[in-house]
């Protein structure tokens, strides 16, 4: 087994922590790994803190949350608090591996590696500095972070990336990273909990009831958007896709399961001439997301295809595929050009957003027989959390001292 000090700027109690951190760590703990988490959490009136503390206590996971402090200037104090906490844990527990997930704490992990000699696993989630330099100000600050990548990533013994494209870019930027060998890179895409997202657990009557609660006619074709809306997501293009769907299916409904953006959607719909009565908005707890997905006939994932999105692996893709829901995505986002395939998962990649291209993609997806949709889930097992955990477990056992490896005698 391995002793792990796990650093993450993303909070366990936030949506991303609940879907992409806690489920992995709980399973890795069951495999015998000893884990201590240092994470940045929103402390004020956060009932999830107590719930996850109980869950981690039962799993034998130690947890030292620090206060989350946005934006950039206050983030300095957050990182200082995380650094002090991580150093204390490192002194007391002498972990085998410092596993750093998120961009800003990479410097802390590199410092711990240099000070104590622990193995350093860099879990590179996205090109954070590149993305902020494209969209945020002051840009010189983020360019400075970009220049610091070699210093923060350089000491890493192994690198996990979400996509093959991200690994290729890191190798080209930092040829000596992780020994300069692709063998020391592991690809772990954002995976889905196939136990939670399982269409077999949702009876047809529940789907019908959910549709009624959303005022969706029984015979309507439902296009789904799942997740938050923001500058990275191409809302006008998604509205254009729905407009083409309405031309094919006049009763079509566009359902947004999101916690923001309703007014922006209405504005874009008005500009595109899409009637507001064809739109539905709702938000829900994570446990209710599968039932909402089950109401959909297809989904859309349109994301800016810049260099910063080479590392993008949308969690929603695995969740939708686990529920046998096909998707339409745009070209140039992470590895989706290769993941999405009409034969494998009844889904389509669009090379552009011309009306004829969008309509052709819709016609292809809608023409797929229903029995083929049931093949989406089994053909997407590589996006299950079980597969992701298996890959992390392999990395931990590779990096841990021989006497600590899982199953060592």
Image (cartoon, rainbow, N blue to C red):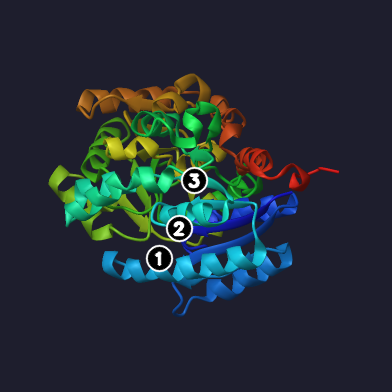
Q: Which mark is residue 79?
A: 1
Q: Nearer the viewer, residue 247 or 399?
A: 399
Q: Nearer the viewer, residue 134 or 74?
A: 74
Distance from disc 3 to disc 2, alpha carbons, whole Å, reads 13 Å
Q: Nearer the viewer, residue 355 or 388?
A: 388
The earlier-in-sequence mark between 2 and 1 is 1
Q: Which numbered disc, 2 or 1, marks the residue closer to the eye?
A: 2
> On screen, 165 above or below 146?
above
The earlier-in-sequence mark between 1 and 3 is 1
Q: Position of residue 84 (x, y in %)?
A: 48, 70
**In terms of secondary structure, where does tag 1 sit?**
helix
Distance from disc 2 to disc 1, alpha carbons, whole Å, reads 8 Å
Q: Which numbered disc, 3 or 2, marks the residue closer to the eye?
A: 2
Q: Which residue is mark 3?
A: 123
Q: Is residue 377 visible?
A: no
**In terms of secondary structure, where does tag 2 sit?**
helix
Q: Is 77 left or right of 147, judged from the image as shown? A: right
> How many numbered circles are shown?
3
The earlier-in-sequence mark between 3 and 2 is 2
Q: Position of residue 399 (x, y in %)?
A: 64, 42
Q: Which residue is mark 2?
A: 108
Q: In what quadrant of the picture does the C terminus appear?
A: top right
**In terms of secondary structure, where does tag 3 sit?**
strand
Q: Position of residue 56 (x, y in %)?
A: 66, 66
Is label 3 in contact with label 2 (beta carbons under 8 Å)? no
Q: Is residue 252 visible?
A: yes
Q: Is 138 left or right of 281, judged from the image as shown? A: left
- Which residue lies at the image location 48% right of the left edge and 63% below the top edge? 11
Is label 2 in contact with label 1 (beta carbons under 8 Å)? yes
């Amino acid at each position: 087994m391995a002793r792990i000090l796990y650093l993450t700027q993303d909070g366990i109690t936030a949506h991303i922590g609940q879907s992409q951190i806690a489920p992995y760590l709980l399973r890795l703990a069951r495999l015998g790994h000893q884990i201590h988490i240092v994470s940045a959490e929103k402390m004020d009136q956060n009932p999830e803190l107590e719930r996850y503390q109980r869950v981690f206590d039962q799993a034998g996971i130690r947890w030292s949350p620090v206060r989350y402090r946005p934006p950039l200037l206050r983030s300095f104090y957050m990182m200082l608090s995380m650094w002090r906490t991580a150093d204390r844990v490192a002194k007391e527990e002498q972990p085998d591996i410092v596993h750093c997930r998120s961009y800003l704490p990479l410097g802390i992990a590199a410092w711990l590696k240099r000070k104590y000699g622990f193995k350093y696993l860099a879990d590179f989630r996205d090109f954070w500095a590149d993305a902020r330099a494209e969209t945020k100000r002051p840009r010189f600050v983020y360019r400075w972070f970009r220049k610091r990548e070699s210093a923060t990533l350089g000491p890493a013994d192994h690198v996990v990336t979400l996509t093959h494209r991200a690994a290729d870019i890191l190798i080209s930027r930092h040829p000596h990273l992780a020994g300069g060998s692709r063998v020391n890179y592991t690809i772990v895409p954002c995976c889905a909990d196939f136990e939670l997202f399982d269409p077999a657990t949702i009876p047809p009557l529940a789907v019908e009831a959910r549709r009624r609660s959303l005022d969706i006619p029984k015979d309507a074709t439902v296009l789904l958007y799942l997740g938050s809306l923001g500058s990275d997501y191409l809302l006008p293009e998604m509205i254009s896709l729905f407009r083409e769907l309405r031309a094919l299916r006049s009763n079509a409904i566009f359902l947004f399961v999101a916690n923001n953006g309703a007014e922006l959607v209405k504005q874009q719909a008005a500009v595109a001439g899409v009637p507001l009565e064809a739109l539905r908005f709702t938000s829900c707890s994570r446990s209710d997301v599968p039932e909402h997905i089950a109401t959909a006939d297809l989904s859309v994932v349109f994301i800016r295809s810049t260099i910063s999105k080479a590392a993008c692996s949308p969690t929603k893709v695995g969740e939708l595929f686990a529920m046998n829901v096909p998707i339409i995505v745009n070209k140039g986002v992470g590895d989706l050009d290769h993941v999405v395939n009409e034969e494998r998962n009844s889904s389509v990649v669009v090379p552009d957003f011309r009306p004829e291209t969008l309509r052709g993609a819709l016609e292809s997806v809608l023409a797929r027989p229903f029995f083929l949709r049931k093949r989406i889930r089994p053909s997407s097992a590589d996006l299950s959390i079980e597969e992701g955990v298996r890959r992390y477990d392999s990395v931990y056992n590779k990096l841990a001292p021989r006497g600590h490896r899982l199953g060592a005698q």
